[in-house]
């Protein structure tokens, strides 16, 4: 009988899906990737997770993980060859700050038109407090949770990337050289390039596409 693999429903540009894909790639776990068009969400994904957000990981026994951090922890609990879960307490606090207040202000900065009364410049300034805290941390250590890259870097980076790309010239002019170098290194990494590979939206009749077969994330310098 053919091997039954976990199925990941993903959207390439979603930061939550980015970090889930990176964790699955680092863990090296066999996984089927199904790229989703958010305007035409597959019935199979909605049946598994009616809330309709990505990422969604459907496990072979039917269990569904519909939160990116749950997917990251699930993958790394099974195989963590680079020690991403080292420094978990520091990572947890940083990720909570990222997903909470920083994400709140990031959304109202990047997508101000979606939030009546939102002042993009004010939310940009409020979000900057989190980036400044990352700058102080990266001035002391090479990575967010210590001397090696790990869970915090992969979980936080996609959101800082969104913040940086919203007004790239403005971000480049800020006094955050360590954050800027950290972000540039992660964006240039083979792991991130693999996670961001463009694939066609999934169709029910297509052959399975394995995430772990897209390329070799071990040929990497930014994620030693």
Image (spheres, rainbow, N blue to C red):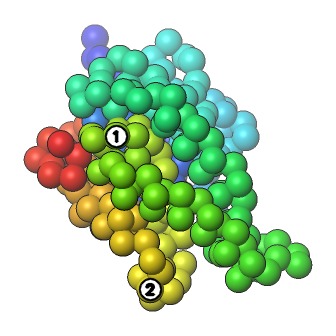
Whether residue 183 is visible, yes or no, is: no
- Crowding around mark 1 (Cα neighbors within 10 Å: few <14, some 14 to 19, many 20+) is some
The numbered mark, 1 or 2, whose residue comes first in the sequence reads 1
- Percent x, y of residue 205: 41, 42
Of residue 101 and residue 117, the one placed in the foreground of this image is 101
Quadrant of the frame with the C terminus:
top left
Query: Which residue is at the far front?
Result: 140
Placement of 130 over or under 97, stated as above or below: below
Q: Quadrant of the N terminus?
A: top left
Residue drawn 45% across the image and 62% down it:
135
The residue under the point 72% across, 37% down is 50
Q: Nearer the viewer, residue 119 or 47?
A: 119
Residue at 54%, 34% in the rendered image = 92
- Count residues near mark 2 (Cα–Cα under 10 Å), then give few for <14, some for 14-19, many for 20+: few
Q: Is residue 152 visible?
A: yes
Q: 103 or 131: nearer the eye? A: 131
- Disc marking residue 136: none
Residue occupied by mark 1: 146
Relative placement, left or right, of 95 versus 77 is: right
Callout 1: SS: loop
Q: Are marks 1 and 2 in contact (CB under 8 Å)?
A: no
In the image, 198 versus 112, the foreground residue is 112
In the image, residue 55 above or below residue 2:
below
Which residue carries the number 2 mark? 173
Residue 30 occupies quadrant:
top left
Q: Quadrant of residue 179?
A: bottom left
Secondary structure, mark 2, is: loop
Q: Quadrant of residue 210?
A: top left
Q: Position of residue 155 (x, y in %)?
A: 47, 45
Determine the residue positioned at 26% across, 62% down: 185
Residue 77: x %, y % from top left: 40, 18
Horizontally, residue 108 falls left or right of residue 151, namely right
């Amino acid at each position: 009988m053919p091997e039954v693999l976990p199925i990941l429903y993903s959207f390439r540009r979603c930061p939550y899906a980015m970090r889930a894909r990176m964790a699955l790639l680092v863990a090296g776990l066999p996984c089927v990737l199904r790229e989703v068009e958010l305007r035409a969400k597959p019935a199979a994904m909605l049946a598994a997770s009616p809330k309709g957000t990505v990422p969604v990981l459907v496990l072979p026994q039917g269990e569904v993980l519909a939160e990116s951090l749950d997917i990251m922890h699930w993958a790394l609990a099974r195989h963590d060859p680079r020690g991403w879960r080292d420094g978990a307490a520091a990572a947890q606090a940083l990720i909570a700050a990222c997903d909470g207040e920083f994400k709140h202000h990031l959304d109202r900065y990047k997508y101000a038109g979606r939030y009546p009364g939102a002042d993009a410049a004010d939310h940009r300034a409020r979000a900057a407090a989190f980036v400044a805290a990352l700058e102080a941390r990266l001035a002391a250590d090479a990575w967010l949770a210590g001397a090696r890259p790990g869970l915090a870097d992969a979980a936080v980076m996609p959101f800082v990337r969104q913040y940086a790309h919203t007004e790239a010239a403005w971000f480049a002019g800020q006094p955050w050289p360590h954050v800027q170098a950290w972000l540039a290194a992660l964006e240039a990494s083979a792991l991130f390039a693999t996670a961001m590979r463009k694939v066609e939206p999934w169709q029910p009749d297509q052959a399975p596409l394995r995430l772990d077969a897209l390329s070799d994330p071990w040929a990497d310098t930014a994620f030693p």
